[in-house]
Image (tube, grey):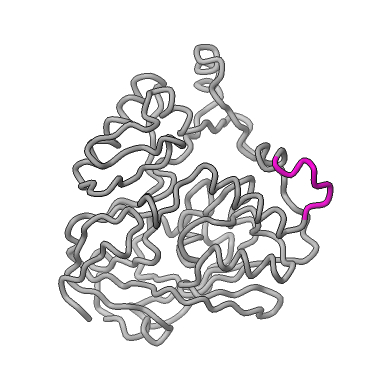
């Protein structure tokens, strides 16, 4: 266990950050070695660091889930260690002709982080295939499995997102099947594969990968934390008012919620002229207004000034309050 450990290599925004105490987690036995009496507020669980904005100083113990791909098939479920690369799991699944997560290709981060915000892309969310999440309780030293229903999934949200329990996700079980129909409900994906009458899971994963690479920066080349804000969800009345005033505002249905619409945070930001906008070395990507990037030496203040400016502008123009998708610690 180290003190004053540098966390810059462990967050994809590449912000300078240090923590008081640091312990790498490579295995279940490492989990079981964590202090049992530590308060939830005194522990930060960090994995790939692709969906987090770290403070300059983290005054708590950082338990860092180490990258290690470990995937098995157990009782007809795909079971993966929390530190497994999410994209590598997708690659593995399509190589085995197992369907269900091919639309989620190239999403950065780890398997253990995926249920926390119910990752989703191109018409699919992890909740669609998740069977259970195994958690380790560092107070009791025991493991427990939460079912899909237990996780209370919704759009970019789950039980884990805002909980005050001494839990660390250790493994995830996914129901991936060789006969699952491909999901081409997302218009851009459907159009991309329009010449392919019977796409395989690998075809879909390849298409998603190519679409994402054409729009999103590689965090190893241009540090970023992916989509910074959630796509706002608004009621029907607000949607109708906005549509009357802004003819081209994108509005999408929300499954099983006829009085709710989803709109595009990227579109809102672009209409407020934030695409490519910078403050210091922090900026919104010039090819996608939703991606916050570090052009080299962005400070925490640069980033906070930019995001507050963006939220204020969207609220003023559209009456919509943007909510961060990235976790701010």
Point out the image quarter for the N terminus. Answer: bottom left
Q: What x and y, as percent, mark residue 113?
A: 45, 62
Q: Residue at left 28%, top 41%?
A: 282
Q: Which residues are magenta?
A: 192-199
Task: Check the image and report above or below for 127 versus 279.
Answer: below
Q: What x and y, as percent, mark residue 62?
A: 27, 70
Q: Residue at left 52%, top 55%?
A: 107
Tell me, yes or no, whether the highlighted magenta stretch contains residue 56: no
**As drawn, is 83 to the left or to the right of 99?**
left
- For the residue pair 236 and 112, the one nearer the viewer reads as 112
Q: What x and y, as percent, mark residue 171?
A: 51, 74
Q: What x and y, as percent, mark residue 66?
A: 39, 75
**As drawn, is 288 to the left or to the right of 177?**
left
Point out the image quarter for the C terminus. Answer: bottom left
**Magenta region's main secondary structure?**
loop
**As drawn, is 312 to the left or to the right of 300?**
right
Q: Residue at left 58%, top 68%?
A: 89
- For the residue pair 298 and 242, the one nearer the viewer reads as 298
Q: Residue furthest front?
A: 221
* Count of numbered circles in the view: 0
The quarter holding residue 131 reads bottom right
Q: Residue furthest right?
A: 197
**As drawn, is 112 to the left or to the right of 327?**
right
Q: Residue at left 45%, top 41%?
A: 230
Tell me, yes or no, whether the highlighted magenta stretch contains residue 193: yes
The quarter holding residue 273 reads top left
């Amino acid at each position: 266990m180290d003190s004053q450990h540098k966390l810059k290599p462990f967050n994809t925004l590449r912000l300078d950050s240090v923590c008081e105490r640091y312990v790498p987690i490579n295995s279940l036995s490492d989990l079981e070695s964590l202090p049992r009496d530590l308060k939830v507020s005194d522990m930060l669980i960090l994995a790939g660091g692709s969906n987090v904005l770290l403070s300059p100083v983290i005054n708590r113990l950082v338990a860092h889930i180490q990258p290690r791909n470990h995937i098995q098939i157990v009782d007809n479920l795909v079971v993966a260690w929390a530190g497994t690369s999410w994209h590598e799991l997708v690659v593995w699944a399509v190589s085995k002709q197992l369907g269900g997560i091919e639309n989620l290709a190239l999403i950065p981060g780890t398997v253990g982080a995926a249920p926390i915000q119910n990752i989703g892309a191109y018409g699919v969310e992890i909740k669609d295939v998740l069977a259970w999440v195994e958690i380790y309780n560092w107070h009791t030293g025991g493991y427990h499995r939460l079912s899909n229903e237990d996780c209370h999934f919704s759009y970019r949200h789950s039980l884990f997102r805002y909980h005050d329990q001494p839990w660390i996700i250790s493994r995830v079980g996914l129901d991936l099947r060789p006969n699952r129909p491909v999901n081409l409900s997302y218009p851009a994906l459907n159009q991309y594969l329009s010449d392919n009458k019977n796409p395989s899971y690998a075809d879909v994963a390849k298409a998603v990968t190519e679409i994402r690479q054409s729009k999103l920066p590689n965090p190893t080349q241009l540090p970023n934390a992916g989509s910074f804000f959630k796509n706002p969800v608004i009621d029907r009345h607000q949607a109708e008012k906005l549509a009357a005033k802004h003819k081209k505002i994108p509005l999408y249905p929300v499954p099983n919620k006829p009085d709710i619409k989803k709109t595009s945070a990227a579109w809102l930001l672009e209409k407020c002229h934030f695409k490519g906008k910078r403050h210091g070395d922090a900026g919104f990507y010039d090819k996608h207004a939703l991606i916050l990037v570090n052009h080299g030496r962005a400070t925490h203040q640069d980033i906070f000034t930019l995001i507050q400016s963006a939220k204020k502008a969207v609220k003023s123009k559209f009456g919509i309050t943007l909510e961060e998708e990235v976790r701010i610690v």
